[in-house]
Image (cartoon, grey):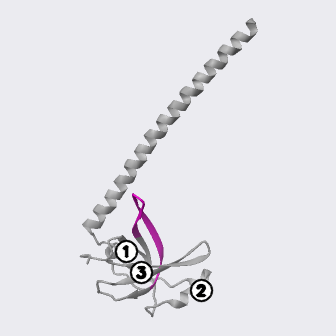
């Protein structure tokens, strides 16, 4: 169990930072949407379901809040709702899907510091920078080789052009 987690409620708009492993690479993907359901509050298996509209299609993801793959949860906006399960939001689109906002102290709610998660996020970020630098060096070498080939081809072409008028 994580030592401290952000208190997420139904009706909150949240950003979930999730660690994704593809092959040998790790990256962080951010999923932002409305929390439509929360279950088993205070338990090791506490979950919350986040919904968003992506390319005109509703996408819902359910996260375990104590999962090691969930690095960080940020509450972006808090809305006034009177239910725990906002299933009616699935049928609403556009302006009718708006919820009335509630003032809250964003800094106080999101001020949860999990050293382990922050270290994991920093490590993934450093790995991405290293691979980016290595790729940039490799691209620079390839461009230099291509430039050298182009210069050699131009020199050869100029030699042939100077020899042709003599003949």
Examine the image and state in which quarter residue 10 appears. Answer: bottom left
Dot 2: what SS?
loop
Dot 3: what SS?
loop
- On residue 92, which mark appears? 2
Q: Comparing marks 3 and 1, which lies closer to the viewer?
A: 1
Q: Whole-Å distance between the Cαs marked 2 and 3?
A: 24 Å
Q: Whole-Å distance between the Cαs marked 1 and 2?
A: 27 Å
**Residue pushed farthest top?**
166
**Residue pushed farthest bottom?**
82
**The magenta segment:** 17-36
Q: Is 25 within the magenta? A: yes
- In the rendering, at what x and y percent does residue 94 appear? 61, 80
Examine the image and state in which quarter residue 68 appears. Answer: bottom left
Residue at 38% over, 88% down: 39
Main SS class of the magenta portion in the image: strand
Question: Is residue 27 toward the left or the right of residue 55 in the image?
Answer: left
Q: Which residue is nearer to you in this view: 145 or 48?
A: 145
How many residues crowd around disc 3 within 10 Å: few (fewer than 14), some, or many (20 or more)? few
Question: Disc 3 designates what residue?
Answer: 103
Question: Is residue 132 toward the left or the right of residue 109 in the image?
Answer: right
Question: Is residue 160 toward the left or the right of residue 64 in the image?
Answer: right
Dot 1 or dot 2: first in sequence order is 2
Residue at 30% over, 62% down: 120
- Judge whether 86 appears above or below 4 on screen: below
- In the rendering, at what x and y percent does residue 101 appear? 47, 82
Residue at 41% over, 43% down: 134
- In the rendering, at what x and y percent does residue 89 appear? 54, 87
Q: Is 24 within the magenta? A: yes
- On residue 106, which mark appears? 1
Dot 1: what SS?
helix
- In the rendering, at what x and y percent does residue 100 appear? 50, 85
């Amino acid at each position: 169990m994580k030592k401290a987690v952000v208190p997420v409620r139904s009706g909150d708009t949240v950003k979930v930072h999730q660690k994704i492993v593809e092959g040998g690479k790790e990256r962080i993907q951010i999923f932002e949407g409305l929390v439509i359901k929360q279950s088993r509050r205070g338990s090791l298996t506490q979950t919350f379901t986040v919904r968003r509209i992506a390319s005109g299609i509703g996408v819902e993801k359910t996260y375990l809040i104590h999962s090691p793959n969930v690095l960080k949860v940020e509450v972006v906006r808090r809305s006034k709702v009177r239910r725990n399960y906002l299933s009616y939001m699935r049928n609403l689109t556009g302006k009718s899907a708006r919820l009335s906002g509630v003032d809250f102290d964003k800094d106080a709610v999101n001020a949860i510091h999990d050293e382990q998660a922050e270290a994991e996020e920093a490590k993934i970020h450093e790995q991405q920078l290293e691979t980016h630098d290595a790729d940039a060096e490799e691209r620079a070498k390839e461009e230099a080789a291509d430039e050298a080939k182009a210069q050699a081809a131009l020199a050869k072409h100029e030699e042939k052009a100077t020899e042709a008028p003599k003949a």
